[in-house]
Amino acid sequence: GWTPAPRSVVVTGAASGIGRATAELFAERGVGVVAVDHDEWSLKEIARLDRVVPLVGDVSTEAANRKAVALAVEEFGGLDAVVLNAGIGGTRPFEAPGAVEAAERILSVNLRGPVLGIRAAAPVLREGGGGSIVVTASVAGLRADPGNWAYNASKGAVINLVRAAAIDYAVQGIRVNALAPGLTWTRINEGVRQNPAFAAEIERRIPLQRFGEPREQAEVVWFLTSPAASYVTGTTLVADGGLDAS
Ligand code: NAD
């Protein structure tokens, strides 16, 4: 059926970048936001906004995911959507010391995090008659970048996790989709921003000739959680300036 716009949403990785822009956009549009991040200091800034409730927590733990969902119900009287966005890089070359441990950390945030998020949110969404789950994947989950195998693997896994969850939860009225951002101006690409010549070289390879802004990703999340996307589930929406098409 035609569900109303969300009243409340949980956004993870909400202290910075795409998560922060998403939390801001939802709050501006009247949606209550539980903003989850393990970076307590950065979370303070977003917590100043009306309708934003901060929660310091690590998404790779079951406790943080359960707390986030419970807090949304407590503060806003229900939960309509979750945006499982927290993610990290840090891949080391295959044969480098510590490469497996680094990969395990990446998988625990980028894959285990969304698994725990889905498990925590689904019963509450179901109770409210349905809802929407959005997981931030990456174009790096659709094709591989050199030297980035662990991140590539985690994002590829998330894209298929979303398909699987969409199938299992469809009968409960819960839609599950992935956002696949391309290169976006966040802390992750801070190093590139410091090097204008390198940035320009990358931008020439992007059909739209520029990096995306976090707000442009947030708008895609908004669409995926909105009634306008009522027939969209199990899909990956690519927002990459044409990078993956070229
Ligand atoms: P960012 O570093 O600006 O923001 C990520 C946030 O997640 C940070 O505030 C960080 O503290 C938080 N976080 C990390 N691990 C966490 C944990 N275990 N528990 C709770 N919070 C945690 O980066 P971003 O670019 O906004 O990244 C958001 C998502 O977008 C990630 O999943 C990333 O992989 C994905 N992505 C980013 C780009 C890009 O170009 N920026 C491209 C494709 C995909």
Image: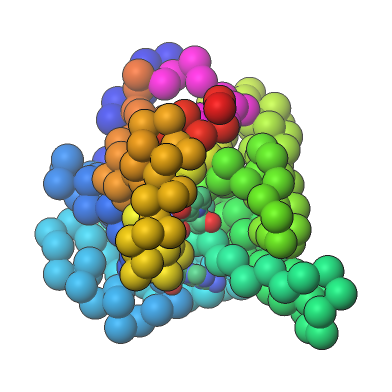
Q: Is residue 229 above or below residue 139?
A: above
Residue 234: tell me if it is visible: yes
Residue 207 image point, x, y percent: 43, 30
Q: Which residues are magenta?
A: 229-240
Q: Is residue 51 above or below residue 4?
A: below
In this orientation, which residue lies closer to the viewer: 26 or 71?
A: 26
Q: Residue furthest right?
A: 95
Residue 146 image point, x, y percent: 70, 55
Q: Is residue 174 left or right of residue 21?
A: right
Residue 140 image point, x, y percent: 62, 46
Residue 96's quadrant in the figure?
bottom right
> What residue is at 36 percent from the left and 37 percent from the top?
209
In this orientation, which residue lies closer to the viewer: 108 or 52?
A: 108
Q: Is residue 215 above or below residue 129?
A: below
Q: Is residue 136 left or right of residue 73?
A: right
Magenta span includes 230? yes
Q: Is residue 62 left or right of residue 15?
A: right
> What residue is at 52 percent from the left and 47 percent from the top?
136
Residue 104: tell me if it is visible: no
User: Where does the N terminus fall, quadrant-wise?
Assistant: top left
Residue 172's quadrant in the figure?
top right
User: Where does the C terminus fall, quadrant-wise?
Assistant: top right
In this orientation, which residue lies closer to the viewer: 188 or 12?
A: 188
